[in-house]
Amino acid sequence: MTTSTDTPLRPQAAAPTTPDFPAIKTRQKAAWSSGDYAVVGTTLQIVGETLCEAADLRAGERVLDVAAGNGNATLAAARRGSEVTSTDYVPALLERGRERAAAERLQAIQFREADAEALPFEDGSFDAVLSTFGCMFAPNGPRVAAELQRVCRPGGRIAMANWTPEGFIGQLFKLIGRHVPPPAGITPPATWGTRAFIDQQFGPGASSIRADKRHFMFRYRSADHMLEIFRSYYGPVLKTFAALDEAAQQGLAREFTSLMNQHDTGRGNALVIPGEYLEIVVTRR
């Protein structure tokens, strides 16, 4: 009789899967191209204005707006006399920005299609780099942070407005994720609204970082009104509803309405929801 000295084979842990970033971005681009984000985006204009003030933009400075959407920070920077390049990977959103700039006769703006993870500019090309609720949705967060720093000159500023995980929009995206889980391995958008992530990504190359929590007030006639607008025009919400069957859509609508009611400070006189975000100004070393 022989005795085996072989040890039982242990199950091998599955190797981590590298996200298919190009495929993810293709789906994201389709989401942001659906509906008409500008219907929601234009209501956020005040955030672009306050961010430009926080960054202390000066006339004549070269400014890049990354993932600019329909141009809130772009227009705010141009109003301060800066020479602005407005970028996004959704051409339809850039067109909305062009329309708004033309209406205000703002001429010192160039609009250019670009991916936040691979900006088509030389190192140190800009005095200030901005993003309002844009870069935070790119799937590869560290890559985006590296690009923002690369195109910003030494001594320049990187200024961002990012929804926090605890705030209303952060909670909305958590709700969406329960119904349609995001791809594994991507940077969760609300991570950009935490000081820890900002310090990790920008700290080594920064001479200073300011991060302050602020609130944007969402104002709609009622929860039903806000649901209608977001479901019809806000790409991520529109696409989430479209991916669900009728029963699941009704469930998501109820949960979204409950979330709005939890955050509503309007006291029965229309809907007023504070949306918490982190305002960041990084001065590059």
Image (spheres, rainbow, N blue to C red):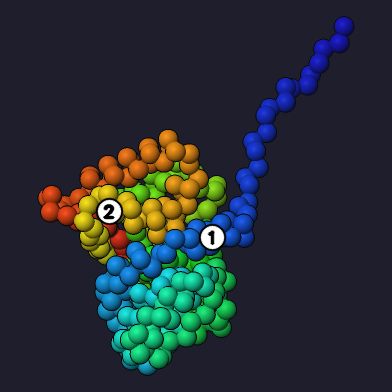
Q: Is 147 in front, or is 171?
A: 171
Query: Disc number at residue 225?
Result: 2
Location of residue 203 in the rendering, given as x and y in whole percent from the top left corner:
42, 67
In front here: 191 or 264? 264
Amino acid carrying label 1: it is Ala
Q: How many marks?
A: 2
Label pair 2/1, CB-CB below 8 angstroms: no
Above or below 11: residue 273: below
Residue in view at x 52 percent, y 53 percent: 186
Residue 42 image-quadrant placement: bottom left
Instruction: For the C terminus, give its image quadrant.
Output: bottom left
Residue under the image location 27 percent in, 57 percent down: 275
Q: Residue furthest top?
A: 1
Between tags 2 and 1, which lies in front?
A: 2
Image point 41% across, 52% down: which residue? 237
Task: Please determine whether, in this image, residue 58 is positioned above or below residue 266.
Answer: below
Q: Which residue is mark 1?
A: 30
Q: Amino acid at mark 2?
A: His
